[in-house]
Amino acid sequence: MTQTEASYHRAPGDAPAPPAGCPVNDFTPFAADYVADPYAVLDGLRDTPVFYSRELGYLVVTGMEDISEIFLDPAAFGSQNVQDPVFPLSATAHAVLSAPDFDPVAVMSNRQPPAHGRIRNHTKQGFSNRRMRILEPYIRGRSHDLVDAMMAAASPADFVARFAHPLPGETIFRFIGFPESDDEKLKGWCSDRLAFSWGNPSEAEQTDIAHKMLAYWRYCRSVVAAKVDDPGDDFASELLAVHKRDPAELTYREVESIVYGLSFAGHEIVSHFLSNALICLLSRRSQWRQICADATLIPAALEEVLRFESPQTSWRRVANTDTEVAGVKVPAGTNIFMSLAAANHQPDIFEEPGEFDIHRPNARNHISFGKGIHFCLGARLARLEAVVALEVLTERLPSMRLVEGQSLQRFANITFRGPKELLVAWDP
Ligand code: HEM
């Protein structure tokens, strides 16, 4: 992989030794018990707000206040590692990604100030309230279509395949300007990217994924290139217009890389958000009934889903300088794993954190969208998609329930959490 400071993905280097005096343990998000229930594992670690995971080679931080301080100090804690593979890449995968044209640049989550602010200013135009109002009828229409198709196929059905996966994918792909005919391959590529940056793929899987990542990047480049002379009514074309007005303000490579970045950022995580919402609500029938009877309760219910069972349970940073976290002296170069899941279940902030309650007054104080200069740019879109989806589902399928006895399988990775499959049934 050819890489510079601003490369989108960087091969992980050697981690510095654990900080002196810091507790060290074998915590790993790849352990079966963590994949099944991270909250139970994290509860057991509550007395150690910062520790070093030998398995990951990362400093793990679990307290809301410490995590907030890290998010709010981008000079000391850089985000350049957030899209990197967790573990070293195999030589073959490395060779595939060393193709001279595999050169996406860091644009937002992994870009550092001051360039980050310049690029974010242009990208945020796509997520304004006005834009959301334009997208809303599309999301509602597709939600109805997907429910129609799910009902036509009869109960029970896999909610992930039938609804949670297609809705956010199609929404973000239309928003960017990808043609519908490419949806299926795009959906597959996004799952591959999740495994690449946050999973622990075997050597053979890494090589396969590396080929697909290269194809994905080349695809993004070709879509952008086609819009240079033939712009559409889409966000990629708007970014190109900014570039055309002032190429120094937004470079061509940055436009390509934003397209590459957003197509992933807006997809799989929202699928998990929708599935997690159903898991929380359908397994607590009285709360499901309440939102069926009163749709104005849906936004608050979704904030509680983001707190209680977030689709994103962690995020990363790296110490740019010798610094300190929760009283522990941390050398420059230390990778940091912030456990958003632990912070979202902190008992002195959220009363009875293990209880799911759509009426929790401070659910919105969760940290699932991050904080500070990198605060999730797509939060408004994610919330809109989930509100509309639940409005449609509660109206059309109030009798929906989880199929009893199913055991939920989740893909082991350090950050994203949602079921691979979710069987739901309803009355005819
Ligand atoms: C429930 C769904 C989502 C969750 C939980 C989520 C969570 C996050 C988190 C934790 C961050 C890092 C924040 C930080 O470093 O302070 C982030 C950044 C980001 N998210 Fe999301 N996200 C979601 C949906 C989306 C969607 C739908 C999009 C776009 C279509 C999106 C685009 C982005 C972008 C571009 C960034 C980087 C922003 C920057 O660095 O300035 N996200 N998100």
Image: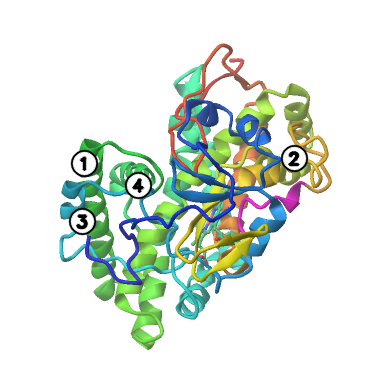
* Position in image of residue 402 (x %, y %): 60, 20
- Which mark is first along the chain, 2 or 1? 1
Label 1: few (<14), some or many (≥20) within 10 Å? some
Lateral position of residue 328 relative to residue 256, left or right: right
Instruction: Of the two numbered discs 4 and 3 on the same chain, state the one appearing first in sequence.
Output: 4
Above or below: residue 428 compared with residue 181: above
Asked if residue 341 lies in the magenta stretch, the reply is: no
Mark 4 or mark 1, earlier in chain = 4
Q: Mark 4, mark 2: which one is toward the viewer?
A: 4
- Which residue is at the front of the view, 224 or 266? 266
Q: CA distance from mark 4 to mark 2?
A: 44 Å
Residue segment shown in magenta: 363-370
Q: CA distance from mark 1 to mark 2?
A: 44 Å
- Mark 4 sits on what residue? 87
The x and y percentages for residue 120 are 50, 73
Element on which disc 4 rests: loop
State the residue position of label 3. 97
Callout 3, which amino acid?
Leu
Q: Nearer the viewer, mark 3 or mark 2?
A: 3
The answer to the question of whether label 4 and label 2 lie on touching residues, with beta carbons closer than 8 A, is no
Q: Which residue is mark 2?
A: 295
Relative to 351, does residue 70 appear above or below in the rendering? below
